Amino acid sequence: MKIISIANQKGGVAKTTTASTMAAGLKRRGYKVLAVDLDAQGNLTTNLGAETEDRATTYDLMKGAASAEEAIQHLSIDLIPADLALASADMEFCQTGREYKLSRALETIKEQYDYVILDTPPTLGIMTTNAFFASDEIIIPACGYDGVKGIINLYNLVRTVQEYGNKKLKIAGILMTRYNPRTNMEQGIRELAASIAQQIDVPLYKTYIRTSVIVEEAKANLTDIFSYNDKNNVAKDYDQFIDEYLKGDKK
Ligand SMILES: Nc1ncnc2c1ncn2[C@@H]1O[C@H](COP(=O)(O)OP(=O)(O)OP(=O)(O)O)[C@@H](O)[C@H]1O
Ligand SMILES: [Mg+2]
């Protein structure tokens, strides 16, 4: 089982879109995939039409009140949902070992999945830290100057996590999202991403994800982009990205 965090503390850079689309794309390739929502906003959860009322969530997993198995819902992809209860996580989980709660909870389903995709919130708080302690790899979706500049802060957290407990953690690469190659400004942003990638010695994926209303349409239909319409540009881009990712993946 390989665990991948989709992370960038900048909001709105397509973390959740990348998490659900990557999970769906890997599933279409025959892999067993689980997605886990670690964000109190619960966007991945609502986008895929999961229930949270009277159902076990990531919060229950963190509390030790439910097992991963109990919390999984079988939708267009398998998902452990999240809701607002997670908003108190930074204050609530403050005892020793707080960084390992997710990692421990996922131990029990190790044999059942090839990939676990973690959708993280737009902060570098306890949930993202738990994600990094549990993960083998991080994929960083980025768009806009702020989304690219913030990669340095994320990199510093990765270094700390590597130093204090998860030596195997690595950044698999940076993925440009919501990208329009036709404008000079966007090209400038990509050049900045390339220079930061070089500085921290991680790949910038050749594939970038274009912009399309299909992303919103898939959400409105409570499903992932591939299940909604696999012929559109965003589905094609993510498909190509997954191929590029798998080429560099020595599982
Ligand atoms: N390729 C795309 N084309 C058009 N819109 C997109 C694309 N990718 C994402 N979006 C839209 O951008 C917004 C942010 O995307 P998403 O929710 O995936 O980002 P996020 O990084 O998870 O945000 P947050 O930090 O709030 O969790 C959403 O409204 C989504 O529909
Ligand atoms: Mg999100």
Image: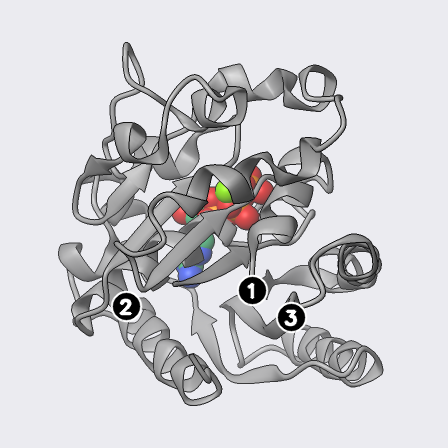
Camera-nearest label, 3 or 1: 1
Which residue is label 2 attached to?
Answer: 26
Give the residue pinned by disc 3. 171
- What's the residue at 38%, 22% (across, down)? 66
- Residue at 50% x, 54% y is 14
Which of the two labelled residues, at mark 3 and mark 1, occupies the earlier sequence position? Answer: 1
Label 1 neighbour load within 10 Å: few <14, some 14-19, many 20+: some
Q: Earlier in the sequence, mark 1 or mark 2?
A: 2
The numbered dot on residue 78 is: none
The image shows residue 63 at horizontal and vertical percentages of: 52, 19
Give the labeled residue for mark 1. 136
Q: Whole-percent x and y of residue 240?
A: 35, 82
From this view, report whether residue 99 is shown above or below residue 19: above
Q: CA distance from mark 3 to mark 1?
A: 9 Å
Q: Quadrant of residue 152?
A: bottom right
Say if 37 sits above or below 52 in the image. Answer: below
- The quarter holding residue 95 reads top right
Q: Is residue 213 visible?
A: no
- Which element type, helix, strand or loop, lies under badge 2? helix
- Distance between mark 2 and mark 3 Cα atoms: 19 Å
Q: Position of residue 123 (x, y in %)?
A: 70, 39
Give the residue type that dot 3 points to.
Ile
Is 198 drawn above or below residue 101 in the view shown? below
Give the residue type at disc 2: Leu
**Of residues 197 and 163, the one drawn nearer to the viewer in this rendering:** 163
Evaluate if marks 3 and 1 touch, with contact meaning CB atoms under 8 Å apart.
no
Left-right relation of 247 to 91: left
